[in-house]
Amino acid sequence: MSSKQNPLDAAAIRADFPILHQEVAPGVPLIYLDNAATSQKPHTVIEAMSDYYTRYNANVHRGIHKLSEEATDAYEGARKRIAKFINAASSREVIYTRNTTESINMVALTWGQANVGPEDAILVSEMEHHSNLVPWQMLAGRTGAELRFIPATRGGFLEMGALDRLLDERVKLVAVTHMSNVFGTINPVVEIAARAHAVGAVVMVDGAQSVPHMPVDVQALDADFFAFSGHKMLGPTGIGVLYGKRDLLEAMPPFMGGGDMIKRVEFTGADWNDLPWKFEAGTPSIAEAIGLGAAVDYLSGIGMARVREHEIAITAYAIERLAEAPGVTIFGPQDATVKGGVVAFELEGVHPHDIAEILNRDGIAIRAGHHCAMPLHRKFGIVATARASFYIYSIPSEVDRLIEALYKTRAMFA
């Protein structure tokens, strides 16, 4: 049966998320609309991590006793399922990190330091999260490389025509978000990667917002590096992933030195371990990796095509309802089919922080601020925005409550 014949039942899914069944004040149920910041966790993820700590807590790779072997199997088994989830060619191309930020910094400090020099350029889009901007600023500062920027339009899209003048053989790396955490825009990564590769550039994709919400195939995207975080996709904090093409990862120096990333150590030198362990020094986030594996299992059980269809529907409904509310300005695309489950907006005469505070009194959790995309906001003369973001457990009645609260907020400031 196709996903369109069997749509996602968000109301039923909510039963799997214990945090959603609470009142933030007497008679005030929680309405969680801050999923772009972090997602909630289903029972299966919580239980998988608890089972590790309760039943087979041990370090991985280093022991030959039963607990260590079981922990290693669970830890590496999660890696294999994550690789399948993003269609990596091999689980050896999946590096565990703490989060998207660490993944991108790893590339900047290893591949970047070895391959970017003062005559080179780094091309970044204007809609990047600070995590996919500041590491490249720092790399440019260390190496003397030029920073270039793909312009973003007020409508929430990249000016792809600008690539004609921005992409040349001096560009060694192109960094772009797959899905904007402000506009929600799904960027044309396949086209960007093809054009970057044509001039010999490597492509770093921030997938923090896309992997949780839509089918992702890193081979089809032809991304050289692709980063995402566990906590935005039903998994725990403290675990992220760097995917890299194997030949690039093989050529890169290690990120950190220590245990597990070595094959042999002498007093005067060492030989590095094979992929992926070359980049995983020290005791890793074992429970968190197991939890991320459980999150991947949960999402795979639903089907990412169904996740995407649900979010298109709930986002379209949110855009429709927000457009009805007086004084609301929505930023980014208005077509839910070209964006993720994110709607950033302003309410005339009310600071976004005031909006968030008043909505909080009604149990509604949204985000307010620049969303770690300060340059993008400043470009368009926006101090901050309010942001509602949705996921598999978001339902239309929550959108209705949001709109009711915005009417109330506007009346308070009239």
Image (tube, grey):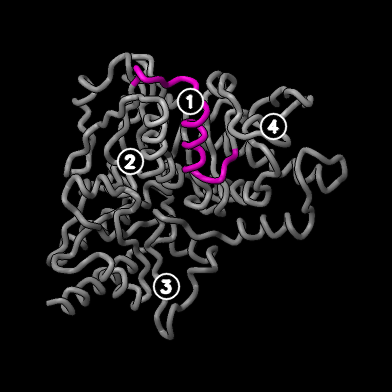
Q: Is residue 316 left or right of residue 271?
A: left
Residue sitting at 73 percent across and 23 percent down? 269
The quarter holding residue 274 reads top right
Please identify the dominant SS of the magenta region: helix
The label nearer to you, 1 versus 4, is 1
- Secondary structure under tag 1 reads helix
| CB atoms of marks 3 and 1 within 8 Å | no
The label nearer to you, 4 versus 2, is 4
Looking at the image, residue 398 lies above or below residue 362: above
Residue sitting at 44 percent across and 60 percent down? 393
Give the alpha-carbon distance from disc 1 to disc 4, as whole Å.
Answer: 20 Å
Location of mark 3 (residue): 30
Characterize the local packing of mark 4: few (<14), some (14-19) or many (20 or more) Cα atoms within 10 angstroms. many
Magenta segment? 96-120
**Image quarter of the C terminus:** bottom left
Give the alpha-carbon distance from disc 3 to disc 2, as whole Å.
Answer: 30 Å
The disc, 4 or 2, on the residue closer to the chain's N-terminal end is 2
Give the alpha-carbon distance from disc 4 to disc 2, as whole Å.
Answer: 31 Å
Q: Amino acid at mark 2?
A: Glu
Q: Amino acid at mark 4?
A: Met
The disc, 1 or 4, on the residue closer to the chain's N-terminal end is 1
Location of mark 2 (residue): 128
The percent coordinates of residue 250 (x first, y second) are 59, 21
